[in-house]
Amino acid sequence: MKYIVILCDGMADEAAADLGGKTPLEAARTPNMDKLAESSEIGMVRTVPEGMAPGSDTANLSVIGYDPKRYYSGRSPLEALSIGAQMGETDVSFRCNLVTLSEDEERYEDRRILDHSSGEIGTEEASELIRALKEEFSGGEASVRPCYADGYTFYVGTSYRHLLIQKDGRTAELTAPHDILTKRIGEYLPSDPVLRDMMVRSYEILKDHPVNVKRRAEGKNPANSAWFWGAGTRPCLTSFEEKNQVRGAVISAVDLLKGIAVGAGMDNIIVDGANGGLHTNYAGKAGAAVKALTEDGYDYVYVHIEAPDEMGHQGSLKDKIRAIEYIDGQVIGSVAEALRDSGTDFRMLVMPDHPTPVRVRTHTSEPVPYMLYDSTKKQAGKTSYCEKTGKETGVFVEEGYRLIDHLLRD
């Protein structure tokens, strides 16, 4: 038996008047999901424990089988594992987003976050901007104010997602930029004077950087400020293989999931063209998953697809529906067909990690629908897979990290 999880980040949503009272998942054309639903178990699962902030970090830990209340130490430390950043026991890491701030206001604290991803800026352009920050804060030629070379280190990540590590630091409550889109940032800035100073100065460094001059000329959002959040200490996950007696791999474009894989001793399978956006390489991810299960000796593959979440943050119903349809046609349908054609028995779990409702443009902590298909079983299912169907079945998993036991052992 082979096991595959298709994790559709942020896919769950609310009913929308513009969709005739349907959610994006209900409104999307998903013939492959619906076909699987006819002979699948469908239910609801709480992936974000009560009292914890809803995020892809806690939620994906749950789905992969780790109790966030026990294993979660912050988002950015997981990303640090992915990019090879070394953390001491007393070090603290911070996610460093490159964001788009409004530019008409005179004071930094009066500005507003217009885009948490700077138009999904590419890694090549973003790395130039991170280098400019490194130069300034390490006391290079461009620096004319206090440097922080001895205590802070920047690391380049992927797209708009980067990392700052503080030596012998302290964790702090910081706000995710996608939680405060269009709001005045003043009340959400760090209380730590060094972090606050670096954020203010980052705007001065980046707003007229050649990369951003070019982006404005092309009609793109400038990446004109750093935004620190997701503080945490070095994580310690138990081995996925020892815990579950299966050999596992992760396919994802984002450093968070890659970091979870590293921490859990799983392999990362890199797919060219996978970028975490709407136009990621869906087919490449599907092909890599099938190859891993049928040729490369893996028992379990976790395919993480970021696009629905990003479209939820952007507030686009149309593009969120497109992302769901791309996943259905280019991933779920092709994976199921290829595994059947290969004669492989498999169990497929399809689900979001958390909702990212278009209306609020950020994560929420409500339970999400899951669909568990077993190619060896014929069972009565439903005519479709969506939030409504999940609630109608009455099946509910309270502790999300236990769902993996159902996938692997039931």
Image (tube, grey):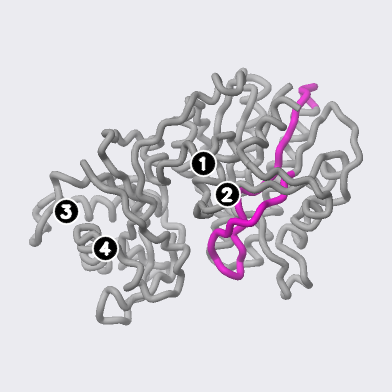
Judging depth in this view, the residue of 100 and 187 nearest the camera is: 187
**In the displayed structure, would residue 107 be above or below residue 131?**
below
Residue 130 relative to residue 388: left or right: left
Q: Which residue is mark 2?
A: 48
Q: Give the magenta part as a residue range.
A: 341-370
The extreme front residue here reads 51
Question: Residue 287 location, x and y as percent?
Answer: 64, 33
Q: Which residue is mark 4?
A: 191
Mark with earlier residue (1, 3):
1
Secondary element type, mark 2: loop
Amino acid marked by disc 4:
Ser
Specify which label sits upstream in the sequence, 4 or 2: 2
Q: Quadrant of the N terminus?
A: top right
Image location of residue 88, percent across then percent down: 26, 34
As for residue 357 lying within the magenta part, the answer is yes
Give the residue at mark 1. Answer: 68
